[in-house]
Every structure is written in C-alpha cells, then in structure tokens.
Image (cartoon, rainbow, N blue to C red):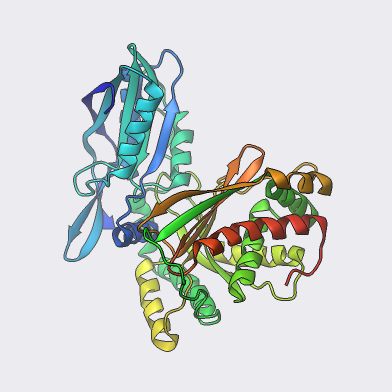
Amino acid sequence: MGSSTTHRVLVPFRGEGAGTADLTWAQLGIWQTMRDTGLSMNIGGTVPMPAGTTVHDMQTLLRYLVSRHQALRTRLRFEGGGVTQVVSAAGEVPLDVVDADEDPAAVAEELRRRYEEAPFAYETEWPVRMGVVRHDGRVTHVVVIYCHVAVDGFGIDAIVRDMANLDPATGTTTAPVPGLTPLETAAKQATAAGRRQSDKSLRHWEQILRAIPAQRFRASDEPHEPRYWEITHRSPAMHLAMQVIAHRTGAGVGYVVLAAYAVALAGLTGHNPSVAQLVVSNRFRPGCADSVSQLAQLSICAVDVAGATFDEVVGRAWTAATNAYMHGHFDPLALTALLERVRADRGDVDFSIIVNDRRTRDGAPQPAAPPSPHQVTAALPLSKSWWSRKVEVLDAALNISVDAAPDAVDVSICADTHRLPPADIQALALEMERVTVEAAASVAVVS
C-alpha cells in the first residue's frame, strides 16, 4: 500500500444484546440497492488525530463502540432466498495499524479508498473497518468505514456523539445506550402498528405513482459508455440566491433546492409535476434520534410548478417534502408488490430520481440577513462546472446531490446518458442556478 507496512491487531469485544431477526425496513432497502447495483455504498472517512493519540487509545475506542452498539456487532445470514441479521454478544474485531514511511495523509487516503471500495464479507466480517496511520511512531490519522446496512450518516453522527460518553482511562461508561437497537426496531416493525405505518406510507406512494406522468425522459440520441455521467456545478451565486429566497419565504434552504430542481426539470422535460425521491432520516420518530443504526429510506414526492411564482413553488416543495418525510417508513417488499400492481395497470412509471441535499444533516439554517440582489448577480461569473465521474452503474436514472463548498454550493448531477444526453445533464445544472438567481431578484411567474 504505497510506502508503508501494515499489521493487524484483534480487539476483543463483549456487549449486551444478541439474537437474530429480519432486516429492518431501512436495512432491507439499502441492501436491495447494494444487491441490485453491485455498489458497496460503504460510508465513513478519515480523521486527522491530535498529537499524543496512541494505538491503545484507538483500540479502547473500537472496543467501546462495538461492545456498546448492536449495529456494529451485526452480520447477515443468507438462507432460503432471504436475508436476516445476526447480532453477536462477543467476538474480535480487527484494527489495522499502518506505518507510513512517507506522506501519512496520502497513505490514509489510500487506506480509506480501499476500505470504501471493497464490499464487506457480510456473513463473516464485522460491519466496521478501522485503521490507524502512524508516521515516525506517531498516530496521525484514523480511517473508519462502516457497512451501510449497519448505519446511515445520521447513525455515524450518533456514534460520534456517543464517543463523549467514553471514559478513556477505563474504557467504560455509565451512560445508557442511546436509541432503539436494530433488533428493537425489527420487532417494532413486525407489530400490527408497524404494519399500519407501512400501509399508510404506501398509500402515499400509490397516490403519486398513479397521478404523475408515466414517462419523464425520452430515449437519448447520445448514449455513452460508461453509461452514467456526473457533472458538478459550483455556484457562489446560487448559494447567495438561496439565502435570499429562504429569508423572503421563511422556508428552509433545502426547500429552495427542491423548488429549483422541480422548476428546472419541468422546463427540461416538459413534464409536470416534477417527481423526486428524497432521503428521509426517520430520526424524528420515537427512540430514533440517537439510534446507532440504519434508519434512512427514500420517499417519493411530486412538486407542481404550473402557473406559479418561484416563491409559490417553494411553498409547494415544502408541502410535498413534508408529506414525503411523514411517509418514508415502510416495508420495501410491500413497495415492490405495489410497483408490480401499478406497472400492470399503466406500464412502467419513471420515478427513478433522487434529490439529496447533503449540506447539513438537519437542513440548512436560516440566514441572519439576506445578501443583496447585486451580490447575487455579481457572483455569477464565479460559477464553474466540471465532469467529475463516469460510472457503469448508479442507484437511480438521475441523482442530484447538493453539497456545501467554500462560499458556494456544489450541485452534482449524475444521470443515465441513455435517457439524458450530456448536454442536457449540464443544462439541468445551469437551469437550477438560473431559476434560483432570477427568483432572488424577482417573484415573477416561472412557468
């Protein structure tokens, strides 16, 4: 692995709670996506460590986390065509110790990439990979990657918060384990109340699936291989414009993002309403806020942009997204059955679009004071775009991610070139910027 040597330490753990259960709805949903696409979807990252950190410190932390959280002691079992989760009470989890001869940051990045790209051995490997990078005998970085079936991004946030409960001297804590465990969630979803929740969510899905245009994209006249191309558009102007609109409407900036997408896509495709699947954290549900687990699911929404000002579309986006969040808790197997019924009645319905505002986990805060229209337009020449990746598979026909950048926003659009040619992918990103910037200066009708 470059100019480095690695040895592995086995860290024993023992925790409360063990057993076998069906996958939770969120676990099953992400597992289906991983299975169908072949993508690992592993999540995590690299953390530079303060001076004085030792390998023993990281062994203590790893033992604490895996002992404490059932999700990190969970492996999968495949039998009879199905999959279940198996939580163990004890075992040993590996910690890789990498001694870097040269740039430790580069060695850590190489380790992160290797951890992230390699699928977990789901039946035999614990769902956390941790590696410590040392340079000249000093720990410089820690790399941690999790299996996405075990935890989502909000679950990682919960892990980080729970680290504060560790007594590093003793490796123990007196704080109770926060939130529902995966086994508790699976049991809750198997009840009659859980079934009613799923049925209610799927009625929301069915209402939209039967009302939206069945086909949204025409066949592209410029298909490419690799099939999926991604462009990233970095826009300081859109970043400022979203603050103006959020301040004016009182809506969160995330709803401005959804409105911009809805208006831009409707203009590009000629189809209204614009449909999207949103990532629902489900952390607002009882016992879920601090749960170390996978709880996120996709939920569908449709935003009508016809005859509306941009501000009115923002309001409609708020309503559509709120309904999606309330109905993002359901059995994926029941959704599959629903999709088969809808397909039998009206053919394939094209809703394979994901919009994911990743700038903050809980939604962007309201700006204290909005920028001026002059500041917004003056920032337009600073925008820049670049093609960031080309891949063979993706989890949707169109995947739009919005990320924070220094004094800007990054709109990344990865799409199926067999449905959207590269020129249209780029046009969608530019149109999201254009409608937002124009709306910041005007409340004119946009469609």
Q: Where's residue 64, x and y in %?
A: 34, 30
* In front of the other: 76 or 182: 76
* In front of the other: 314 or 215: 215
* Residue found at x 64% / y 70%: 267
Instruction: Give above or below for 234 relative to 280.
Output: above
> Which of the 4 quarters of the picture holds residue 365?
top right
Q: Is residue 317 left or right of residue 336?
A: right
Instruction: Give above or below for 16 relative to 131.
Output: below
* In front of the other: 342 or 100: 100
Q: In this view, does 411 lie to the left or right of 139?
A: right
Q: Can residue 179 be seen in this view?
A: no
Q: Can residue 230 be seen in this view?
A: yes
* Residue found at x 27% / y 22%: 4
Instruction: Give above or below for 434 relative to 304.
Output: above
Q: Where's residue 101, x and y in %?
A: 31, 16
* In front of the other: 96 or 1: 1
